[in-house]
Image (spheres, grey):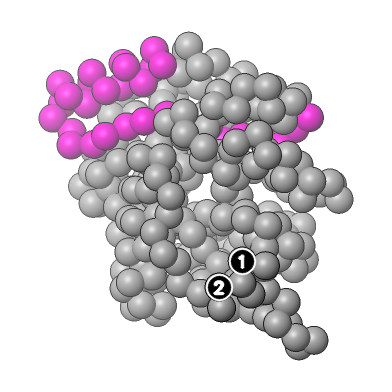
């Protein structure tokens, strides 16, 4: 399994506080069957995003993992908050915040007061060469109340990542309910841990993989826990996806994107 959202690097945000904890998190992840992790420190008004410091901490962690014989490949990305300053900087530096300096960008919405311009912002990011992935929408109170808002974003190409713990109910009932609704409609592209520590928010995915395989099919579990994250990690296009339910078809007719109408 491959985890594309994890606060593993030490001393950068509200994730791992030190190298010892980072190594413990990495060992826990590896024992759970995770082979690759994208370390994604926050870029927000609270936490300054420094590529140079991140590179130093990444090298430090890789060295420690090699010394401790922890079989885990770690790369860097960002938990990108959609603030005005972040957006303007990303538009000028399209590979500053992305996963492994590829096109894929994890974006996090504010919990409250979503702007009506979110769709326009996502379009601007794509126009600048980035491929936004919305992190844990199932945990966003605004989207829990109004999940329909995501439909137009997804029809324009937005991908969704939900948290492994949400599927199991560890993030509360509303998040669990929405996570399973998204899974049942095949709207989810990625499962990730969003791990911050070894106890309350650990880097574990195996139980979630097994539950999804049991309820929604092993092919879908593998797609969103292994194949899609692997493509992101390598900076490659996603493999063929399962058809999302209800995203393009409407009662008033076949309101499909132009490319689906063209190619049937």
Q: Nearer the viewer, residue 234 or 60?
A: 234
Residue receiving disc 2: 263
Above or below — where is 232 with respect to 144?
A: above
Q: Nearer the viewer, residue 254 or 196?
A: 254
Mark 2 Cα shell of 10 Å, populated few (<14), some (14-19), many (≥20): few
Q: Position of residue 201 (x, y in %)?
A: 45, 46
Q: Position of residue 116 (x, y in %)?
A: 86, 50
Tell me the SS state at disc 2.
helix
The span picked out in magenta is 55-84
Give the quadrant of the C terminus.
Answer: bottom right
On the rendered structure, is 207 left or right of 141? left
Above or below — where is 176 with respect to 196?
A: below
In this view, which residue lies farthest toward the front? 262
Q: Residue at x 34, y 56 (%)?
A: 227
Q: Quadrant of residue 48?
A: top right
Q: Residue at x 32, y 17 (%)?
A: 59
Tell me the SS state at disc 1.
helix
Indicate whether residue 63 is drawn in magenta. yes
Residue 174: in sight, yes or no? no
Above or below — where is 264 with respect to 258?
A: below
Q: Which mark is residue 186?
A: none
Q: CA distance from mark 1 to mark 2?
A: 6 Å
Residue receiving disc 1: 259
Q: Position of residue 21 (x, y in %)?
A: 34, 29
Q: Residue at x 62, y 56 (%)?
A: 157
Q: Position of residue 132 (x, y in %)?
A: 60, 45
On the rendered structure, is 37 left or right of 121? left
Indicate whether residue 173 is drawn in magenta. no
Q: Quadrant of residue 45?
A: top right
Number of numbered callouts drawn: 2
On the rendered structure, is 37 left or right of 200? left
């Amino acid at each position: 399994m491959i985890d594309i959202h994890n606060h593993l690097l030490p001393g950068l945000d509200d994730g791992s506080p030190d190298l010892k904890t980072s190594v413990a998190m990495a060992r826990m992840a590896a024992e759970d069957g995770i082979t690759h992790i994208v370390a994604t420190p926050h870029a927000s008004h609270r936490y300054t995003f420094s590529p140079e410091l991140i590179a130093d901490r990444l090298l430090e962690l890789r060295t420690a993992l090699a010394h401790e014989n922890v079989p885990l490949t770690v790369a860097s990305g960002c938990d990108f908050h959609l603030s005005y300053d972040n957006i303007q900087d990303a538009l000028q530096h399209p590979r500053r915040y992305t996963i492994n300096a590829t096109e894929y960008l994890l974006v996090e919405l504010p919990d409250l007061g979503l702007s009506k311009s979110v769709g326009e912002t996502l379009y601007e990011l794509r126009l600048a060469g980035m491929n936004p992935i919305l992190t844990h929408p199932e945990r966003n109170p605004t989207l829990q109340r109004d999940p329909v808002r995501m439909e137009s974003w997804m029809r324009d190409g937005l991908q969704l990542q939900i948290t492994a713990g949400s599927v199991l109910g560890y993030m509360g009932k509303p998040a669990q309910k929405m996570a399973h609704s998204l899974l049942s409609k095949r709207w989810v592209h990625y499962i990730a841990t969003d791990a911050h520590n070894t106890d309350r928010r650990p880097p574990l995915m195996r139980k979630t993989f097994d539950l999804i395989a049991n309820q929604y099919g092993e092919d879908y579990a593998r797609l969103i826990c292994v194949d899609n994250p692997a493509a992101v990690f390598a900076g490659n296009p996603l493999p063929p996806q399962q058809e999302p339910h209800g995203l393009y078809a409407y009662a008033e007719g076949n309101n499909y994107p132009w490319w689906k109408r063209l190619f049937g």
